[in-house]
Image: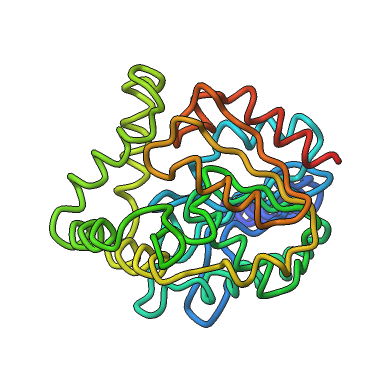
Amino acid sequence: MKTVALTIAFLFTFIQSQFLFAQTRKPASAGREEYIEVEKNVKLHVIDLGEGQPVVLIHGWPLNNAMYEYQYQYLVEKGFRVIGISLRGFGKSDRPFGKYDFDTFSDDIKVVLEKLKIENATLGGFSLGSAVTLHFVTKYNGAHISKLALFGATGPSWKQREGYPYGITEQGASDLIKQTKTNRQQLVSGFGKGFAGQEGSLSEESLRWLESINLDASPYATTQAIKALGDLDLRPELGKIKIPVALFHGVNDKLCDFSLSEQLHKSIKGSYLVRFEKSGHGLFLEEMDKFNSELEKFARK
């Protein structure tokens, strides 16, 4: 009986100490959600770091929020709260069957910003993400944000149209879409190599890293998103933009020609264009220091 009593006393003391520890331990995390539900059964993965004025970053195709690895810590150390959102179908976000168009992407971003209570943010978008952010701004009249930054933009239209000889041809777009359904791995390999503005400007390690991120996307979302980009023509919407807009573009961009940002610059009143003379589509890596400092400067204005 004495042994039983001692055992019970020991267990009671142990449980009590664990309870007191749980009550007194100060949480190490900031309590922010890593996954945010945007509709029933659909959650987006969010990287949310730092304190201060918010900067929200949207990735390109078929990347995810991991692409901004070398921007996150820089901005945190400069006193910003930086948020990277993986669009549905990409990265660690959910991959439901359904729509992968620009209304859907914009609506998802709106929910995330509402749930995080973000206001007066600088919103940045790379490549296809530039079209997502432009569409978001025009659809929601700049809700939650005060500035827009576009990196390696796909222009007001990624595809050539009547009276608009810029961007990819109709045949080029069709071939690309077909390749996403028949040889996605080869497409991604070539796409990653196309990020470099000139031979050797991106290391082999960086190219493999980009390729691994691109391959992580849902194949279905990869196809549907690029089809939606081909259907998107934002030219009639650009006059609605009343907030400051910065355009960052590599002069040697092989994937989204520099002329696409020039067209945006001409069409968005008060915008300014930053040329990255040593970069292609990978300007956020090829001229990382300049990219980060220019983004910081724009966000502080």
Please indicate whether residue 70 sits to the left or right of residue 166 in the image.
right
Q: Which residue is drawn at 77% across and 39% down?
A: 298
Residue 189: x %, y % from top left: 24, 39
Please indicate whether residue 143 sits to the left or right of residue 42 in the image.
right
Please indicate whether residue 280 sits to the left or right of residue 222 in the image.
right
Please name whichever residue, 190 or 80, is drawn nearer the observer in this view of the structure.
190
Where 218 sits versus 284, above or below? below
Residue 123: x %, y % from top left: 69, 53
Please name whichever residue, 269 or 100, is drawn nearer the observer in this view of the structure.
269
Residue 136: x %, y % from top left: 63, 68
Q: Is residue 169 visible?
A: yes
| Displayed quadrant of residue 90 | bottom left
Residue 110: x %, y % from top left: 66, 71
Where 298 sits versus 106, above or below? above
Q: Which colour scheme is used?
A: rainbow
Q: Residue at x 53, y 58 (%)?
A: 45
Where 9 sits versus 152, above or below? below
Name the residue furthest top.
200
Q: Can residue 17 be seen in this view?
A: no
Name the residue furthest front.
163
| Displayed quadrant of residue 12 | bottom right
Name the residue furthest left.
182
Q: Which residue is drawn at 34% across and 69% down?
A: 224
Where 89 sits versus 15, above or below? below
| Displayed quadrant of residue 139 | bottom right
Please name whichever residue, 80 or 200, is drawn nearer the observer in this view of the structure.
200
Quadrant of the drawing holding the C terminus: top right
Q: Which residue is drawn at 45% across and 73% down?
A: 101
How many labels sit on residues? 0
